[in-house]
Image (cartoon, rainbow, N blue to C red):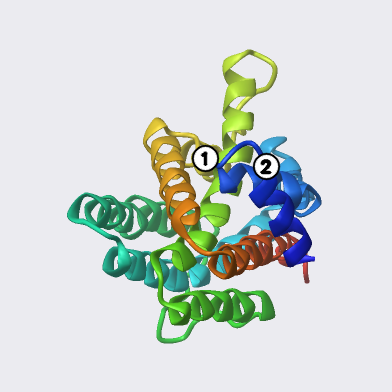
Amino acid sequence: MVENSMAQTLSSPTNRLSEQLRDTHRPAWDAAVEHRFVRDLVADTIDDGVYARYLRLDYGFINDLTGAVGHAVAMAPGMPEKTRFAQFLGVLTDEENDYFLRSFDAFGQPAPTFDNPLKHPVLDDFAALMDRQRAAGTYLDILAVLVPVEWVYLSWATSASDAVARGEAEMPARFYLAEWITLHALPDFRDFVEWMRSEFDREAAAADVAARARAETAFEDALHLEARFFAAAYES
């Protein structure tokens, strides 16, 4: 499947691999961006127990995500790129961490600790994907998983925020839902994801067929894991 889709990608008139991969793997993309979890969150109908479970899972995922972003800092080709990823690390460990702590407090739950992390198969599989991409060793390899992971959030959160701005919907009343949408629809986050996509597209354009195929596999795997991650929130 990868060889066939890569052949289509290489013959496409556009050289933006990120767009091509999103379109090639549209069912996996839609399964994540339009997941029941996203719909329930945006509509403010999600059960608090479901959302609290999601937060615990996501807080566990942050440990692997920060490791991947740290690897991107190391692999980035120049100081401007390293600085951009370092700034994102600051967001993850400051603004987002503060959001998690306030949300756990609202639920009357302690935050999971990194020395006693939450265990779940989807977290294990995400960690394995991150490890695989770091082991592959190139800037493109780590971008291939960071881009879809963050782009999915930008897509659904921006759609929700834009609907509110147009007067077609209301922001959820619960602060932990409204803030989670807002955090992923901010102009700074949009700029960062678009910048990562440009980095990915540039690196892919200069890569050989094998590297591009490896990037496609990681991109698709990340999309499937995002949908599984959302589904895990509904497990009792």
Q: Amino acid at mark 2?
A: Ser
Q: In the picture provided, is 38 more to the left or to the right than 218?
A: right
Other-residue count near label 2 (Cα within 10 Å), few / some / many at <14 / 14–19 / ≥20:
few
Tell us which disc is closer to us: 2 or 1: 2
Residue 140: x %, y % from top left: 45, 62
Q: Tag count in the figure?
A: 2
**Could you say which quadrant of the image residue 23 lies in?**
top right
The N terminus appears in which quarter of the rendering? bottom right
Residue 98: x %, y % from top left: 36, 54
Residue 211: x %, y % from top left: 54, 68
Helix, strand or loop for disc 2: loop
Residue occupying image coordinates x 65% and y 67%: 217
- Where 121 sits versus 65, above or below? below
Q: In the picture provided, is 115 more to the left or to the right than 121?
A: left
Q: Which residue is mark 1?
A: 175
> Between residues 8 and 122, which one lies in front from this camera angle?
8
Residue 233: x %, y % from top left: 70, 63
- Where 60 sits versus 22, above or below? below
Residue occupying image coordinates x 61% and y 67%: 218
Residue occupying image coordinates x 64% and y 22%: 163
Q: Residue furthest left?
A: 79
Helix, strand or loop for disc 1: helix
Q: Which residue is mark 2?
A: 12
Q: Residue furthest top?
A: 167
> Between residues 85 and 108, which one lies in front from this camera angle?
85
> Between residues 50 and 231, which one lies in front from this camera angle?
231
Q: Report how far apart the C-alphas of labels 2 and 1 lie in the structure.
A: 44 Å
- Where 14 sits versus 232, above or below? above
Residue occupying image coordinates x 41% and y 69%: 68
Q: Amino acid at mark 1?
A: Phe
**CB within 8 Å, label 2 to label 1:** no
Residue 111 appearing in the image: no
